């Protein structure tokens, strides 16, 4: 390559670099910022709280062992439909039958004792009556009369004691018969056997105050289904019975079911969260208004609860709302008066900060685009939906607000010239 050609190539490269530098400087000093805008429009806005939990039947019964014994008969299996009173299972009744027989004999003995003591009491009363007559005729001493009265008192006491013992034996027999009846377990309600925890030959254990007994099986009424979810403590205050909800079951991700809040728990559910912190949730119950096919208790579910809703109100995209402190706005507006129009993104690192002891006042607002210029406009907003804020004041229908990109909104200066890069994707209603 000749020296002349090298000089020409170097000169061309330098010219290209100069053009790029000039273009970059123009872009920084006098260019327009690319933004997306959305018109302020009338919309329906709903505030929704999402929580997760599981599907459970509204009514279910855990059948537990009321006595200790071996399961000798099992008449059902998991998934069976049963009616109230249907036989479910039987526990070995031999020890309880023996107890009943023994107590029956004890009751008969106690009743015989009562008959004997009552007969003795009748004789003691006759003897005392005769003693009174003899004493009145002068044929019996005072000591003999007192002895007859003492015998009568003792007979009355023995009769009462025998009666109480007989009553105690009858109560014991009644208890033993009740326990014997518990050996044959029947369904307390109509439903489906959703859990069966024993097999024939296994032992059932009766529960105590501190130790629960063996849950033999569970019967659930699957005609009424609920979603039991946990709602964070910061959101549960907005949940009220009667609010509408949408339920999604993880096993059927493409289907939604209608629901309504029926219960909001008052007791906190505490669990260990990340970084050693403790999460505090509250149970919320949502009754499903639609039938779930092939439903099973324990299926994972998520619930969207509508806690607030406003219809036909002005709204702006959530990402349009930003915050500026009063001092920054003042600097931008005063600085813009002496600078060329089109000053682009603010260099926040070069802006003087306020005094350390002066706390700047934050102002919520949006950037409204008018004639190619973005002006910061303070606004007052209401509830937030999934995509939009309700506008209480500060904007009018049809005004265009900057809605993206997010980084541009964060750095945008008041009075900056902008270029609407994309067409408005939504029109005012």
Image (cartoon, grey):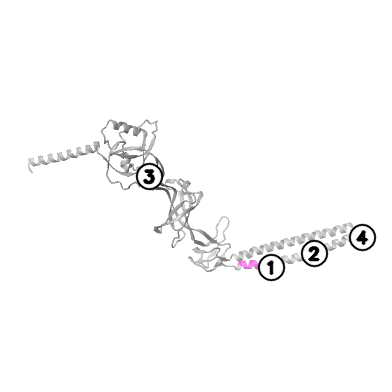
| Residues at marks 1 and 2 touching, judged by CB atoms closer than 8 Å | no
The circle on residue 157 is none
| Residues at marks 4 and 2 touching, judged by CB atoms closer than 8 Å | no
x and y, in percent, of residue 243 in the image:
47, 51
Of label 4 and label 1, which has the lower sequence position?
A: 1
x and y, in percent, of residue 216 in the image:
53, 63
x and y, in percent, of residue 257 in the image:
43, 57
Q: Secondary structure at mark 3?
A: strand
Residue drawn at the location 66% of the way across and 63% of the way down:
172
| Residues at marks 1 and 3 touching, judged by CB atoms closer than 8 Å | no
SS assignment for the magenta stretch, majority: helix
Which residue bears the numbered disc 1? Answer: 105
Residue drawn at the location 22% of the way across and 37% of the way down:
26
Which residue bears the numbered disc 3? Answer: 315
Q: Is residue 223 left or right of residue 45?
A: right
- Spatial separation of the CA atoms under disc 1 and disc 3: 85 Å
Which residue bears the numbered disc 4? Answer: 137
- Give the number of the mark in front: 1 or 3: 3
- Image height of 333 relative to 166, above or below: above
> Toward the viewer: 315 or 112?
315
Residue range highlighted in magenta: 95-106
| Residues at marks 4 and 3 touching, judged by CB atoms closer than 8 Å | no
- Spatial separation of the CA atoms under disc 3 and disc 2: 98 Å
- Spatial separation of the CA atoms under disc 4 and disc 2: 26 Å
> Toward the viewer: 172 or 426?
426
Q: Secondary structure at mark 2?
A: helix
| Residues at marks 3 and 2 touching, judged by CB atoms closer than 8 Å | no
| Residues at marks 4 and 1 touching, judged by CB atoms closer than 8 Å | no
Which residue bears the numbered disc 2? Answer: 120
């Amino acid at each position: 390559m000749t020296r002349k050609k090298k000089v020409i190539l170097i000169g061309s490269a330098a010219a290209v670099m100069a053009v790029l530098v000039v273009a970059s400087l123009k872009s920084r000093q006098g260019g327009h910022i690319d933004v997306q805008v959305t018109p302020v429009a009338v919309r329906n806005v709903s505030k929704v709280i999402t929580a997760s939990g599981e599907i459970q039947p509204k009514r279910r019964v855990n059948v537990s062992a009321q006595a200790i014994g071996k399961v000798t008969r099992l008449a059902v299996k998991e998934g069976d439909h049963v009616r109230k009173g249907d036989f479910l299972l039987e526990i070995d009744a031999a020890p309880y039958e023996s107890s009943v027989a023994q107590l029956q004999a004890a009751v008969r003995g106690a009743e015989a004792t009562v008959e004997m003591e009552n007969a003795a009491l009748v004789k003691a009363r006759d003897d005392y009556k005769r003693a009174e007559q003899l004493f009145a005729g002068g044929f019996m001493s005072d000591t003999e009369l007192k002895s007859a009265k003492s015998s009568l008192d003792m007979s009355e006491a023995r009769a009462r004691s025998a009666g109480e013992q007989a009553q105690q034996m009858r109560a014991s027999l009644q208890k033993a018969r009740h326990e014997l009846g518990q050996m044959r377990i029947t369904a307390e309600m109509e439903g489906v056997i959703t859990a069966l925890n024993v097999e024939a030959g296994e032992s059932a254990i009766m529960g105590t105050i501190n130790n629960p007994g063996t849950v033999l099986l569970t019967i659930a009424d699957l005609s009424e289904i609920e979603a039991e979810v946990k709602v964070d403590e910061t959101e549960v205050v907005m949940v009220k019975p009667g609010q509408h909800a949408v339920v999604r079951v993880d096993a059927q991700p493409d289907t939604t079911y209608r629901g309504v809040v029926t219960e909001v728990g008052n007791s906190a559910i505490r669990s260990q969260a990340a970084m050693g912190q403790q999460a505090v949730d509250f149970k919320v119950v949502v009754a499903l208004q639609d039938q779930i096919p092939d439903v099973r208790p324990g299926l994972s579910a998520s619930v969207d609860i509508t806690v607030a809703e406003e219809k036909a109100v002005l709204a702006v995209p959530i990402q349009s709302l930003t915050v500026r402190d009063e001092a920054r706005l003042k600097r931008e507006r005063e600085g813009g008066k002496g600078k060329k129009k089109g000053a682009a993104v603010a260099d926040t690192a070069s802006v003087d900060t306020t005094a350390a002891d002066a706390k700047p006042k934050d102002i919520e607002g949006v950037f409204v685009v008018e004639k190619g210029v973005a002006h910061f406009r303070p606004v007052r907003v209401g509830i937030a939906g999934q995509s939009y804020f309700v506008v209480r004041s500060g904007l009018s229908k049809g005004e265009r607000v900057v809605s993206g990109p997010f980084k541009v909104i964060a750095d945008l200066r008041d009075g900056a010239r902008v270029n609407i890069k994309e067409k408005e994707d939504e029109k005012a209603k």
